[in-house]
Image (tube, rainbow, N blue to C red):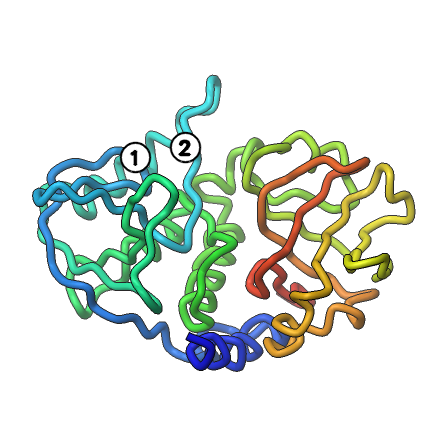
Amino acid sequence: MRLVYRQFLCALAMTVAGGAHAQNAPACQLETIGTATVRTVIDGRTLILTDGREVRLAAIETPEAEPGHAGGAEAAKAELEAFAGGKDIILKRHGPATTDRHRRLLAYAFAAEDRPSAQHALVSAGLARAGSRIGSAGCAAELFAAERTARAAGIGLWGDPHYVMRRAEDPAGVLAQRGRFAVVEGKVVSVREAGATIYVNFGRRWSEDFTVTVQKRSERAFTAAGLELRKLGGRHVRVRGTIEERGGPWIEATRPEQIEIADGH
């Protein structure tokens, strides 16, 4: 397991630290779990197979059906229904088989070996965002590239003010997404250390401005991925994760793929 993670970190350096385009990054290499037939599509990320297993699409985030904002969730479900509803799919994974807390199998779904994944289809259509737990540098590169294209075109979620990328210099706008997954972009003002925590600050007022925290015990993983946290001052970065409130808006980064260098991208 350590070897696999080390290989991931080395590959991720090509993607995160350099802001590399997908064609310069390692391929998205996944292990085939098997084939299955989809019985029901529950939502934009969840499938029920005919053998009774429940599958949650890994590596992406799709919107939930919130009051007043159900359109994004409905569109994602419709896209996944068209992709996999009642069809045979190939299930693949990165690393050992994993399940979430609801015992749903986390996997990538493919309609055929030579076709993009359901994840890629949803992100390309602007109906999902690359998540904060991707696990593979190659898969992260592909999803980030698809997301950039959809965002630039303003399609799907990227055309809805409720889901658009948040600006770090607008902490109130970021905090409006408290408890939800969001993508935040901005210029790092400073990087500080206090106790067991590294603070990546996007403003000078810690009690109001957007901040990203990384536990010092995790710093080695970020460095191995080519992301030197202490050298982020002055850089434009893109951060993804769940928005929390600690004085101002805050994201805790536990994995290198949560922080993407956005200079020129």
Q: Is residue 229 left or right of residue 180?
A: right
Q: Is residue 115 left or right of residue 6?
A: left
Farthest right residue in view = 204
**Residue 19 placed where, x, y %?**
60, 72
Q: Which residue bears the numbered disc 1?
A: 43
Q: In which quadrant of the rendered view does residue 162 lie?
A: top right
The quarter of the rendered structure image containing the C terminus is: bottom right
User: Which secondary structure, mark 1?
Assistant: loop
The residue drawn where x is 28% and y is 50% is 105
**Residue 225 placed where, x, y %?**
59, 76
Q: What residue type is labelled 2?
A: Gly
The residue drawn where x is 44% and y is 81% is 3
Local crowd at mark 2 within 10 Å, few (<14), some, or many (≥20)?
Answer: many
**Badge nearest the viewer, 2 or 1:** 1
Please determine whether, in this image, residue 241 is positioned above or below residue 73.
Answer: below
Residue situated in front as seen by the camera: 71 or 204: 204
Residue situated in front as seen by the camera: 204 or 157: 204
**Residue 143 placed where, x, y %?**
43, 61
Q: In which quadrant of the rendered view does residue 78 lie?
A: top left
Please determine whether, in this image, residue 236 is positioned above or below residue 173.
Answer: below
Please determine whether, in this image, residue 202 is positioned above or below residue 74.
Answer: below
Q: In which quadrant of the rendered view does residue 164 lie?
A: top right
**Residue 170 placed where, x, y %?**
77, 39
Q: Measure the alpha-carbon separation of dots 2 and 1.
A: 11 Å
The residue drawn where x is 68% and y is 52% is 185
Q: Earlier in the sequence, mark 2 or mark 1?
A: 1
Q: Which residue bears the numbered disc 2?
A: 72
User: Which secondary structure, mark 2?
Assistant: helix
Q: What residue type is labelled 1?
A: Asp
The residue drawn where x is 62% and y is 33% is 177
